[in-house]
Image: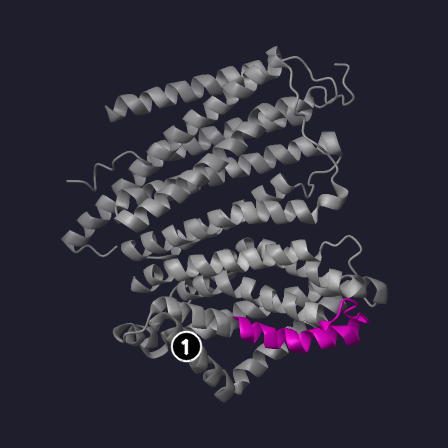
Amino acid sequence: MNFLRSGWATLQKDMRIEWRGRARAQGALCFATLVLLLFSFAAGPDAVTLGRHAPGYVWLAILLTSTLSLSESMRVEMDDRALEGLRLLPVDMRGFFLGKLVSNALFLCCIALILFPMSFALFEVKPTLGFARLAGVVLSGSMAISAPGTIYATMATQLKARDILFPMLLFPVLVPALVASVKATSLVLFGDPMHEFGGWMSVLVIFAFVYSILGIVLFERIVEE
Amino acid sequence: MNGLINGGWDYVNAAYSIVWFVLISYGIFAWKQSRPNQEKLP
Amino acid sequence: MGRFLDLGLFIIASGLLLLGSIWGLWIAPPEAMMGDVYRIMFVHVPSAWAALMAYTTCLVASVIYLFSGKSGADHVAAASAEVGLVFNALLLITGSLWGRPTWGVWWTWDPRLTTAAIMFFAYAGYLALRGAIDDDRRRSTWCAVVGIIIYADIPIVWFSVKMWNSLHQLQSSPKTMDPAMVTPLRIGAFAFLFAFLWLVRRRVVALRLRAQNDILMMNEGDPR
């Protein structure tokens, strides 16, 4: 019971921090949209090319923003040694991890909520398979990025070379999540004649599930050192 | 030498040379590093 | 005892490597389709096996460390990750050198090749993390966690790249092989196995020496 209560309390706390310090969320959002624009400039003004690669651009923008938002969300816990204080209280660290994971994923969902409409306007694409499926991809994709991301962010924020080490550790592990989110999104945008959508969604869900379980099991070992 | 691809020996030689070079130099490194340094140990 | 084991491993490894190279380069007949290029296989495939073996050793040692807290397990994990990275580099280089004459490209998004490349970067990150932590217990525990996380990624990466690339699969691997070509491949596999064992043992010894040295330095109060 303590497990879920700790998780819920952490989630509420994070939401409140995000809401009260809106400047940070705005900064991350600004970064994400800028990345999306930069990708368009790098690829050139050809509308067909841009449209075809729209899912890739959006997910790369989310991925790059996640390196900022994940380490920022863990930095809050390290400031004033808040995490150490938390460990003195009867807080279930596994629940804490789960709460962090969900709040990080929700933050990425909010970024996606802005980026996808922007990409519809910029790249002239629309979700042919409907918004419900797109929401499913966004939700599971955000979970898939956040699950290993939260584990690595906990370590990286306590290191001197965190800005280099965090993406260096995170990006190779995230390759399947990126491939699956981009593929699933492009199926939603451009139609799915071969019925591949379910396969890619299961890759995403399995990835998110495996790393959530690993995080819940191993998180206590990370914070106790 | 009647395969579909001829003149592949350059690639074969390069591959074997690199494998031998890397294994030998890493082996020397591993050997040297694992020798106790007499000055630092009592 | 340990010294004889090391010497034995070294002699077997270098002898088999030499024998495998001679056999692969001069004794084995050229292949019907690929001519002589296929000879790269005798070092390419064993390096793949050795790399996978090294990473599996790293995983097992990581799990053992998390349960037992013995620094020996941590040393084995560190050593095998490093040795695995070397074999992984050889795998990528020889794979590239094979791909150019046979498929006309240096690189292809084949599931095995892509997985190998991603694992190379993942374990490079693992070793970078090792270098970035000063505290011994923290380094061992965190790296054990990362060792498990990365290994869990191998099947997912492989499967997702396979699915991603399924529509334009370019090549298949030669499954049916002449017995004259199986022998050098077996020799190569055992050569790399013994080279792996010897290298890991040397690296473990080096790490143990360094740890002992650190303790001595600490006792003397010598700033490092």
B42 or C85: nearer the eye? C85
Quadrant where the N terminus of chain C sits is: top left
Left or right placement of residue C122 versus residue A158 in this view: right
Residue A209, given in percent of the width and then of the height, sits at 51, 59
Going 41% across and 73% down the picture, which residue do you hit? A7
- Residue numbers of the magenta segment: A105-131
Above or below, comparing residue C101 to residue A98 in the picture: above
Determine which residue is flagged by label 1: A10
The residue positioned farthest toward the bottom in the image shown: A20
Q: Estimate the x, y position of residue C3 in percent, counting from the top left.
A: 26, 24
Residue C71 higher or lower than A153, as above or below: above
Which quarter of the rendered picture does the C terminus of chain C lie within? bottom left
Please give the name of the residue rendered at 42% of the width and 50% of the height, measured from the top-left corner.
C148
Residue A124: say if magenta: yes
Q: Does residue B17 appear anywhere in the picture?
A: no
- Circle 1 packing at 10 Å, graded few (<14), some (14-19), many (20+), is many
SS for dot 1? helix
As for residue C53 lying within the magenta part, the answer is: no
Res B28 → quadrant: top left
The picture quadrant where one finds residue A123 is bottom right
At a point 43% along the width and 42% down the height, the residue shown is C81
Where residue B32 sits in the image (x, y, percent)?
34, 33
Q: Nearer the viewer, residue C172 or C121?
A: C172
What colouring method underlies this structural image? Answer: one colour
Q: Three-letter amino acid code at disc 1? A: Thr
Residue A71 x %, y %: 47, 70
Depth check, front residue: C125 or A60: A60
> Is residue C194 toward the left or the right of residue A109 in the image?
left
Note whether residue C106 is visible: yes
